[in-house]
Image (spheres, rainbow, N blue to C red):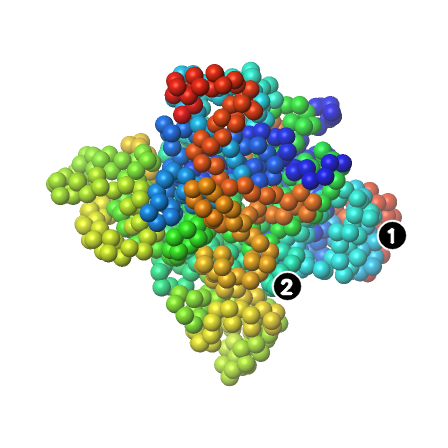
């Protein structure tokens, strides 16, 4: 038995991903022991390297918090795929890799000469993982898109938020972060295990729209079975009341409260001091609370609005009633005592960006926990990859640099 | 190495005991559809989630919950009351046949029944035990009650969803179920690869809050690096053609003119010209504005805190936006999507579930998957696969009825007699 061996140690990933959903996926592999060689180029900068947030007055390609948070623990290897000599170098990398990952528009890898057949020639059991927007075939295969248009396409925007409001979605490119990278990691690990058992590689495809539409599965079934077009219902649920976000003391402070049962309702009433309105006939049953939900919400907010969100949460949770502060980024990073104790956010020193926070792994392995290294600067590991991974000598490397291949 | 012919699926040598409630159900489904034998262990009478609607033909029945169906396909089901000594004994008899246990009980509960990780290890030393709880096994909030909305709120993602000044929005569909289960499945697969290589099992711990935190996008880096607090922006279109517009039959999303993303503003102008709806936008004073927009300015307009900059830019852009909104209002979302994309513009319809099931791309790729339900004498169309393997194919079977596999597992595998099964059923153990 090997102590402290990470689950993916010995696995190498040739990572041609860019922007969000792809790099987040490969970071998960890197944090758990895989050697992820991020193939980038100064000729074709990953848009996230140029995206905010960057430190005030310090705008370079190495300091974006957007990029860095999703590329921890990787090696950055600059290779200009548009150069005719790049293909050979890329194939040498593939030959010593287990996984090739990409999330380009269909046909991009092929344009560079990196067809699956070519990859197989140099590495017969290679696993090619593709994460296109809509899939590699079909009438919309070449439609453009990225995270922002997936929420509307996949039905998430239509179904979320208030019914009398424009369906704006969740304020983020939601499925870029856990859903699509997560499904892609799962598919990759399954393909790896399949390879370990059978000796066979394969092509894995995660069409981002398909992966995203999985999360509205209930609405799809309601549609296909009952022919019912679900609409957004705000924060309410058919089987709970009160259920929503309630205004608390302070600027833009809110606490959610969720009461699912009569027991929880009684506990809620007691916890808030058993005011007169709690005893009103119309709130005595679940059905009554549902029928008078507008008024109920108003009364609940009457109680929450004179208290801090933290006080509301702590009071109710102490009584066994589900409640939680609508935390903002500052809360989760600096104030949440629980996250602090568990050390979810990891602070790492970066030569240009300084000390910044990174999201830690979304799950914890008891014996082989993941760990993070700072995100790489553009081309930081080009020399190391050339020498250690591709076994190049100094002269060959120098030539490739001068020719603009390693760029 | 196993003979390829004997190992057609990624996980067909793996058995999972699935004790999970709502947040972990999708995990068991994912594992089952990668080939694992997932035995769902429900309390007698059935999992409480079976009582959550919508229901098949609106018939309220624990064997007809569509909510449950969507999260529990391809599993087998047995019933077992693990709070009883007999129930615990049966679970321990089943354990040696299992490789993975997934559960969502409050921290310490299984320990109190003598079924904690250390107890499981005594029976099956290389077991992989995955717990999914609201806040993890340790820490001051670890005993908090955590339905979906609480996890969503505490993870920071809710704060970003909705309109400024109004109550933040919970996303549709208990997204915690998906995120927590995806994290759990990832952890379990990594633990399995580790076990394959070393023979060593381990615990996989998932906190629902932690499973969701990454969904905050750039909000934490913004605070960390710039002390800018990202909030809700609603449908504030600080740039024309970036946001949601009302069209003839619903809504569309436009993402046009963002540098570096293709989808150029001049092409949108050409489209408006072709349709005869460009109004005065060809005049120099409007055209020139776009040359000045770069990524940083756009980011500043969206996420920045420079009120002056926003105040200078927004009014100049409002006129353009109004012309564009009038243009869009004339067409259906399908036309805007097809024609916009044909022109290389990022346009997407805000699809309803009805649009989704008619989507030509999803249907071309046969994404929606018919699943036979002989017990309901019908075939039901499910959401399709999250990923596609060139081999072996993804497969899905209908979810089980309550305790459908009691006979098969208890009598067929554990060797209980028919009388014993009936007695245990009568006693409320099974």
Say which chain tag 2 marks. B
Q: A38 or B18, which lies in front?
A: A38
Please provide percent x and percent y for residue B414: 84, 45
Crowd tier of the residue under label 2, counting other residues whose Cα lies within 10 Å: few below 14, some 14–19, many 20 or above: some
- Dot 2 falls on a residue whose secondary structure is loop
Camera-nearest label, 1 or 2: 2
Residue beneath label 1, please? Answer: B419
Q: Which residue is mark 2?
A: B143
- Check disc 1: other Cα within 10 Å, few if <14, some if 14-19, many if 20+: few
**Residue at x 27%, y 57% (from the top left corner):** B307
Residue B98 position within the rendered picture, expressed as x and y whole percent measured from the top left: 76, 43
Quarter of the figure that contains the C terminus of chain A: top left
Q: Say above or below: A265 vs B196.
A: below
The N terminus of chain A lies in quadrant: top right
Rendered image quadrant of residue A32: top right
- Secondary structure under tag 1 reads helix
Would residue B83 appear left or right of A40 to someone viewing this image? Answer: right
Residue at image point 72% right, 57% down: B43
- Which of the 4 image quarters holds residue B341? top left
Is residue A392 or residue A341 the one in the foreground? A392
Residue A236, position in %: x, y? 48, 62
User: Measuring 35% from the left and 42% from the top, which residue is drawn there?
Assistant: A59
Q: Chain of mark 1?
A: B
Badges 1 and 2, same chain: yes
């Amino acid at each position: 038995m090997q102590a402290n061996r990470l689950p993916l140690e010995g696995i190498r990933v040739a990572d041609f991903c860019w922007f969000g959903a792809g790099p987040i996926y490969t970071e998960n592999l890197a944090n758990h022991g895989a050697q992820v060689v991020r193939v980038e180029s100064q000729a074709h900068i990953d848009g996230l390297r140029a995206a905010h947030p960057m430190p005030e007055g310090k705008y370079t390609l190495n300091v974006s918090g957007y990029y860095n948070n999703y590329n921890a623990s990787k090696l950055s290897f600059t290779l200009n795929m548009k150069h005719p000599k790049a293909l050979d170098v890329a194939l040498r990398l593939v030959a010593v890799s287990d996984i090739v990952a990409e999330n380009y528009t269909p046909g991009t890898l092929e344009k560079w000469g990196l067809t699956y057949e070519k990859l197989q020639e140099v590495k017969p059991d290679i696993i090619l993982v593709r994460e296109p927007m809509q899939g590699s075939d079909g009438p919309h295969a070449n439609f453009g898109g990225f995270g922002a248009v997936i929420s509307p396409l996949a039905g998430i925007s239509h179904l979320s938020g208030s019914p009398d409001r424009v369906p704006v979605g969740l304020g983020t490119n939601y499925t870029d972060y856990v859903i699509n990278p997560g499904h892609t990691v799962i598919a990759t690990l399954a393909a790896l295990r399949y390879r370990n058992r059978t000796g066979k590689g394969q092509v894995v495809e995660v069409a981002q729209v398909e992966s995203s539409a999985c999360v509205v599965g209930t609405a799809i079934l309601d549609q296909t079975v009952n022919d019912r077009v679900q609409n957004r219902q705000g924060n309410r649920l058919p089987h709970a009341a009160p259920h929503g976000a309630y205004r608390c003391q302070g600027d833009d402070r809110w606490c959610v409260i969720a009461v699912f049962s009569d027991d929880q309702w009684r506990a809620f009433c007691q916890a808030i001091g058993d005011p007169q309105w709690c005893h009103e006939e119309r709130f005595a049953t679940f059905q009554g609370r549902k029928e008078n939900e507008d008024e109920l919400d108003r009364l609940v907010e009457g109680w929450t609005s004179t208290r801090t969100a933290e006080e509301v949460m702590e009071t109710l949770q102490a009584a066994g009633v589900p409640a939680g502060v609508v935390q903002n980024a500052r809360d989760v990073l600096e104030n949440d005592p629980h996250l602090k104790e568990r050390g979810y956010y990891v602070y790492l020193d970066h030569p240009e960006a300084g000390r910044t926070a990174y999201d830690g792994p979304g799950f914890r392995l008891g014996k082989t926990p993941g760990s993070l290294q700072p995100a790489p600067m553009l081309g930081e590991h080009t020399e190391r990859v050339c020498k250690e991974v591709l076994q190049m000598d100094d002269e060959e490397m120098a030539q490739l640099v001068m020719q603009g291949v390693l760029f | 190495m196993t003979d390829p012919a004997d190992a057609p699926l990624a996980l067909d040598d793996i058995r999972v005991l699935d004790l999970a409630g709502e947040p972990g159900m999708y995990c068991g489904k994912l594992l089952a559809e990668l080939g694992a034998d997932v035995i769902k262990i429900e309390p007698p009478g059935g999992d409480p989630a079976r009582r959550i609607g919508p229901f098949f033909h609106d018939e309220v029945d624990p064997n007809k919950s569509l909510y449950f169906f969507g999260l529990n396909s391809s599993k087998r089901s047995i019933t077992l009351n693990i709070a009883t000594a007999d129930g615990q004994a049966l679970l321990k008899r089943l354990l040696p046949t299992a490789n993975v246990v997934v559960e969502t009980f409050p921290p310490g509960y299984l320990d109190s029944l003598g079924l904690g990780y250390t107890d499981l290890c005594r029976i099956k030393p290389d077991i992989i035990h995955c717990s999914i709880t609201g806040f993890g096994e340790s820490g001051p909030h670890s005993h908090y009650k955590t339905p979906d909305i609480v996890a969503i709120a505490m993870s920071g993602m809710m704060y970003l969803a909705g309109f400024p000044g109004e109550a933040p929005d919970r996303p549709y569909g208990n997204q915690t179920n998906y995120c927590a289960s995806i994290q759990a499945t990832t952890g379990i697969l990594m633990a399995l690869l580790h076990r394959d290589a070393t023979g060593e099992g381990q615990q996989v711990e998932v906190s629902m809050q932690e499973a969701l935190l990454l969904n905050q996008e750039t909000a934490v880096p913004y605070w960390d690096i710039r002390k800018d607090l990202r909030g809700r922006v609603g449908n504030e279109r600080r740039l024309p053609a970036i946001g949601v517009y009302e069209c003839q039959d619903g809504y569309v999303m436009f993402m046009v003119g963002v540098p570096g993303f293709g989808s150029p503003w001049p092409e949108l102008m050409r489209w408006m010209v072709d349709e005869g709806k460009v109004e005065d936008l060809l005049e120099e004073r409007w055209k020139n504005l776009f040359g000045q927009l770069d990524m940083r300015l756009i980011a500043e307009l969206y996420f920045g805190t420079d009120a002056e900059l926003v105040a200078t830019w927004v009014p100049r852009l409002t006129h353009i936006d109004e012309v564009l909104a009038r243009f869009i209002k004339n067409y259906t979302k399908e036309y805007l999507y097809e024609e916009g994309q044909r022109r290389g513009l990022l346009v997407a319809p805000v699809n309803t579930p009805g649009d989704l099931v008619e989507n030509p791309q999803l249907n071309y790729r046969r994404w929606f998957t018919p699943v036979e339900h002989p017990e309901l004498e019908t075939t039901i169309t499910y959401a399709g696969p999250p990923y596609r393997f060139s081999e072996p194919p993804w497969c899905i079977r209908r979810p089980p009825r309550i305790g459908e596999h009691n006979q098969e597992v208890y009598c067929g595998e554990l060797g209980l007699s028919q009388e014993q099964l009936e007695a245990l059923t009568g006693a409320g153990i099974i």
